Every structure is written in C-alpha cells, then in structure tokens.
Image (tube, rainbow, N blue to C red):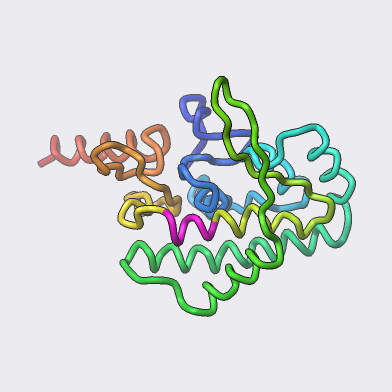
C-alpha cells in the first residue's frame, strides 16, 4: 500500500485509523507499505503521536505528562513490550476471525492488565447529554497499558465477532470492525485497497 493524497482521510499524523475500534487501530500500526511490513511504533515519540492521533491523549495536561517521560529508558522498554503484545493480540484476532476464542494464557494476560491498570472515568457534557469518558493521566510509561488493555477486552467481549475481519486483499494485513448496515465491508478502506482490487477485477473481466 502506498499512501496517496486520496487516502489522507484514513491517515492521522502518519498512522492508519480504519479499524473502527481502538485495539484494531493499535493492531494496524504495522501495515504493509510499498510491499513490505513497516513498524510505525518505532520510538516512544512515535507512540506518543499515536496516542494523540487515536484520541487517547487529548488534553494539554496529558500531553505534558507524556513529554515528561517519553525520552526515558522505561518508555523505550514499554514500546518493545507493546509491540510484543500487539503481535499476541494479532494471533488472538486471527483466531477470532476463524471462529475460535483466544487461548487461556492470552485471556489471563488481558485480565492482568485490567487489574493492574484499571481505567478511570469521568462524566462530560456533550450538548444536552452527559457521557462517560475514559480518564487517562499517563504519569508513568506503563500507564499506557490501561487504555490498550481496556480496548483489547472490549474487542474480545463486547463486539459482534463476525464483523471483526481482515482486509480481503492478500497484500494487506489490516483488520477492521465492520459497522456497515449490511455487514458487507470487505476492505480496510476503499481508498487503500478497495478501488485497487475493483480495478484489478474489472481488468480480469475484460481480459476474459
């Protein structure tokens, strides 16, 4: 996949957001670009950019807290641990897409994250309504596990699993949660893979 100007809506600050769910967007931080896998979470600074782009980190206070630790060795270690967890999550998602529940060891890992890094919440106004909003104050690098663990738990337990899918393109490794009315979404994005595959199918029909 090569990013073009037509695809900007799928990218935010160098990261893809086509998953419709936070854990899947986290999973998609190692896409295929220009024909090869590319790691996007290469440094703590890149992780910070992803957290901001994803909406996990939003307030000036949260951003300042992250800046206070992003150059530390602890933050570098966290990035390595997150990448390793992401690949275990990938294996779990592939099992879900085949109709199987992830193994007990992975479920135990998620439960440990939920216990050790519980998500706090607050009420916020949205027009005339009140909404429950996750409260994230990253005082130390490991606090990042809070929203990641909660999103993984939501993915495993609260979504309609038949709508969790990998892009149908063989050249793509992105996953998404299909929120379309008919549940017929096939590609990570029409801008990235959909149009290309449709053109290829049309050309095959013409040759036939």
The picture places residue 127, in percent across and down from the top left corner, at 57, 20
| Image point (44%, 62%), residue name | 93
The picture places residue 200, in percent across and down from the top left corner, at 26, 39
The picture places residue 110, in percent across and down from the top left corner, at 58, 68
From the viewer's side, name the closer residue of 64 and 1: 64
| Image point (64%, 38%), residue name | 55
From the viewer's side, name the closer residue of 187 and 58: 58
Magenta segment: 152-158
The question of residue 30 being in magenta is answered with: no
Is 141 left or right of 58, judged from the image as shown?
A: right
The picture places residue 26, in percent across and down from the top left corner, at 57, 51
Q: Residue furthest top?
A: 127
| Image point (18%, 41%), residue name | 204
Magenta segment's dominant SS is: helix
The question of residue 157 being in magenta is answered with: yes
Q: Residue furthest left?
A: 208
């Amino acid at each position: 996949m090569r990013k073009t100007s037509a695809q900007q809506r799928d990218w935010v600050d160098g990261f893809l957001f086509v998953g419709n769910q936070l854990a899947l967007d986290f999973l998609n931080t190692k896409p295929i670009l220009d024909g090869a896998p590319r790691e996007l979470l290469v440094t703590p600074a890149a992780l910070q950019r992803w957290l901001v782009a994803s909406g996990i980190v939003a307030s000036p206070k949260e951003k300042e807290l992250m800046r206070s630790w992003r150059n530390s060795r602890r933050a570098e270690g966290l990035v390595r641990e997150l990448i390793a967890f992401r690949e275990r999550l990938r294996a779990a998602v592939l099992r879900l897409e085949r109709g199987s529940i992830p193994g007990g060891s992975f479920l135990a890992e998620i439960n440990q994250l939920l216990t050790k890094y519980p998500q706090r919440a607050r009420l916020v106004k949205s027009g005339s309504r009140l909404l429950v909003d996750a409260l994230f104050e990253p005082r130390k690098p490991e606090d990042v596990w809070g929203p990641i663990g909660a999103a993984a738990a939501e993915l495993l337990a609260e979504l309609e699993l038949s709508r969790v899918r990998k892009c149908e393109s063989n050249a793509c490794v992105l996953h998404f949660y299909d929120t379309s009315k008919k549940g017929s979404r096939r590609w990570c994005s029409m801008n990235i893979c959909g149009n290309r595959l449709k053109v290829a199918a049309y050309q095959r029909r013409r040759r036939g």
